[in-house]
Image (cartoon, helix red, strand yellow):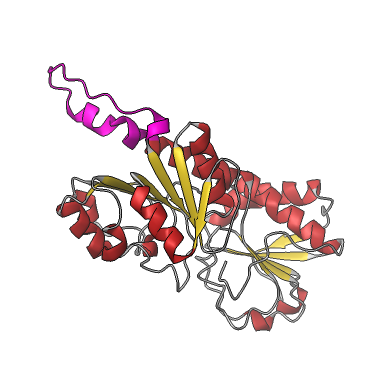
Amino acid sequence: MTTTLLFASPPLWPAYEAPLRRALDEAGLGDAALVTEAEPEAVDYIIYAPNSDVKDFSVFPNLKAVLNLWAGVEGVVGNETLTVPLTRMVDSGLTEGMVEWVTGHVLRHHLGIDANLAAQDGTWSKSVPPLARDRAVGVLGLGQLGAACARALAGLNFDVAGWSRSPKTIDGIACHHGDSGLDAVLARSEILVLLLPLTDETDSLMNAARLSRLPQGAVLVNPGRGQLIDDAALIDALDGGRLAHATLDVFRTEPLPPEHQFWAHPKVTVTPHIASETRPASASRAIAANIARAERGEPLHHVVDRDAGY
């Protein structure tokens, strides 16, 4: 019998206990112990949430793997006590949620919905947007979530180009990589979506210089990581008129402090980190499937590359 330990803040246990037990049973692991406390030597797997307080994984001598409950692993990937495989969360619920949020906000900006809502003053004034095929959209980050969003936007007939740090090929998407590829995508993107992982290389990627490479009046949409953007540079670009708007779902400090200038800025839309929320039912199935693979001696899915950081 395996023992799986859920390391997360207390509020998560009521939401995850039943879905995890059901998923483990469906995966043929109905006799597995699912606990929030256990003797270290009894623990086979750890389901890890970045908001948990565990720091030292070396105390678990029989640990086989750590399965991250969320998509981002930046809070744990550099932990030197973690020597067993670390997996990141990839599941249908995360992907679907991100695609819905991204396409919704790209369409919102493309169609000028904010301006239409603001102009409900009795004045009949038309402003017809271009068709999607005439709107250039860029997606930075072509991993699981970025690729899915790029395909969805292309499916709506947007002119989509994507960038990743290593070469990628996605049908219907103009894929770029490297420094010159990044410049090419920035220069054409009337709407830019950020879906890169957070690493040393991507921290503050969107600084003043790169924001200045976007077309005049471009829109920035960030459901990726708050640290991808230099906040002060973004405010300057908005105030100076270089950018028309920024829709932000993630921030350097979360929850976003009430006094932060993003809240009151007329060209910033804040959403409270909801673009791709981990949903207990689908996340539990992904975790149980990976534990079942490990118990059958099969390679785990979505193992993190420690050198790359994701």
Residue reaching furthest to the right: 296
Whether residue 278 appears in this view of the structure is no
Q: Is residue 128 magenta?
A: yes
Residue 68's place in the image compared with 157, above or below, is below
- Which one is in front, 215 or 275? 215
The magenta span reads 107-134
Q: Quadrant of residue 70?
A: bottom right
| Residue in the image at 67% along x and 60% along y | 302
Quadrant into which the N terminus falls: bottom right
Q: Does residue 59 appear to the left or right of 176 in the view shown?
A: right
Q: Is residue 49 magenta?
A: no
Whether residue 132 appears in this view of the structure is yes
Q: Does residue 134 appear to the left or right of 116 in the view shown?
A: right
Q: Does residue 242 appear to the left or right of 52 in the view shown?
A: left
Residue 197's place in the image compared with 84, above or below, is above
Q: Does residue 129 appear to the left or right of 265 in the view shown?
A: right
| Residue in the image at 69% along x and 51% along y | 286
- Which one is in front, 307 or 185? 185
Quadrant into which the C terminus falls: bottom right
The percent coordinates of residue 93 (x first, y second) are 59, 44
